[in-house]
Image: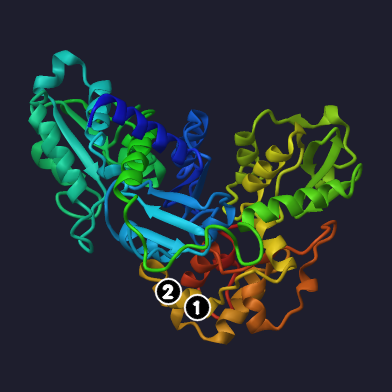
Amino acid sequence: MDRVHREELHALRSDSLSRAAVLLVGHGSLLDPDSSRPVHKLASHLRDCGRFGEVRTAFWKEEPQLHYAFDLIEHPEVFVVPVFMSEGYFTDRVVPRDLGLDGRVTCRGPWRIQYCDPVGSHPRMSEIVSARADELVPAADRASTTVVILGHGTNEHPQSARTTLNMVKKLRNEDRYARVLPAFLDQDPTLNRILETERTGPMAVIPFFVSEGWHVGTTIPKDIALEGGEHGPAGPPIWFSRPVGTHPTMAEVVLDLVGCDSDTAADQEPDTPCETSSFREGGLPAVEARKEFLSWIRAAAPGYRVFLQAAVRCSGQDRFEIRHEKDRDAATTALRSLSNLDQVRDVARRTATGEYRPLSTAPNLQKGWRLADLTADEVWEAFARLYPAAPVHWQLKSIGRLDVVSFREAADCQTGLYAGTADLDDDHVEALAQACCAPERCLREPTWAVQISGRSSASKLWAGQDIVVPCPAPCSVFFSIATHAVDELPPSASTLDPPWGSR
């Protein structure tokens, strides 16, 4: 292909990607608020580069959740990028199952979805691993230093360790370090075993993980007695790097993955054609919900609308302000002004006392802040961070198009950690729904549980709230509680309390 044709192809590809959405999917955590931070930061970098029409995130154990990820997306062409370091259980089973994917290219309603390889499989990851090692080890010490690439691994999936082993092989071929060895959390050889048998000189441990999380940020440094990431137990020094997934060049890896996938998948068509021109009788759900949500806000001007615990109003010339509903009458000077949308997410992730809020619709959103002088687009993005997909679900229910997934349907699809929840009988599920989804714990109406409990949605209306916001499917918080309560009926306070803070 000559230079002119290459430039034409690049221009066509760039134009196509500017009209597409990228969905970054990760693991997330119900216990660690920083687990998903690298994925959110990666999404922010991709938005800043301006190559895509839209960049969204979704998680298995956090909000926005995988099962409603497409409810947030406003473009019919979607590239799903798994932010995982290797192929395995999550990339092969959990993500395709929860996103409703049936191959490399899937048509799901109005969306044409292309499923990319996980970021850890990209060839550039070896450069990032090498860069992490070079950050730690002085050039003069590299010839005597052993580099250990630490992966997760599992004996339950034979492919899980492959990417880590490939990284080891590539770094060995560079021949810059004394030795390069693999180690794993959940299979042999473990890191402790490597430290016991292979520590003959300086050692640099490179976590082949997306984020610091619980293991990389806490348990591993504690287990090997690291202090400040540079010193270990008595003997030669041990260096411990930041995870490879936090490296600033990860955005370039995603750009390459999506660009390559747009070429290789261009001639692949799924068995079921896509309804790309329409969504039933209207447009894509998020597009239609955005219009209705903003119209609803404007209709109350100059007064506030209250959506869950957020009060929003039109402040003139189509500019908007958002604050906690209990701060509606507070003086502007008494509130902390937020300067960007990332700060909105930070507000939503912690209570006033700093506790983690894995459930965005728990009734403990902290007060004392305001977000002012917003455009209509910024209002929509702010609510996407405060209450992911909730405005879309409210609008879909109002027009009779909300797809509800009952507990039984959702539980029958679970594998691994949550598989045992399928054995719960209706009485047990009813007790859990009554306890977990009560207004003092969640402000959404559990539409999926109404089939069991027979409760009216009006029973969920919380004081100060203008509308009832539905929950169309049991969330990961509910499944986590259900998993721990399989043998406990009725559920105890100790079972229910950990995922939520107090009101």
The kind of residue tagged 2 is Cys
State whether residue 231 appears in this view. no
Q: Eyeballing the image, is 338 above or below 58?
A: above
Q: What label does residue 113 carry, if any? A: none
For the point 23% across and 64% down, the residue is 156
**Residue bearing the label numbered 2:** 413
Of helix, strand and loop, which one carries label 2?
loop
User: What's the coloring here?
Assistant: rainbow
Q: Mark 2 and 1 residues: CB-CB less than 8 Å, in contact?
A: yes
For the point 48% across and 64% down, the residue is 108
For the point 27% across and 27% down, the residue is 132
Q: How crowded is mark 1: few (under 14 residues within 10 Å), some or many (20 or more)?
A: some
| Quarter-of-image position of residue 167 | top left
Q: How many labels does the image show?
A: 2
Of residues 270 and 384, the one drawn nearer to the viewer in this rendering: 270
For the point 83% across and 58% down, the residue is 466
Q: What label does residue 409 carry, if any? A: 1
Q: Eyeballing the image, is 193 above or below 139?
A: below
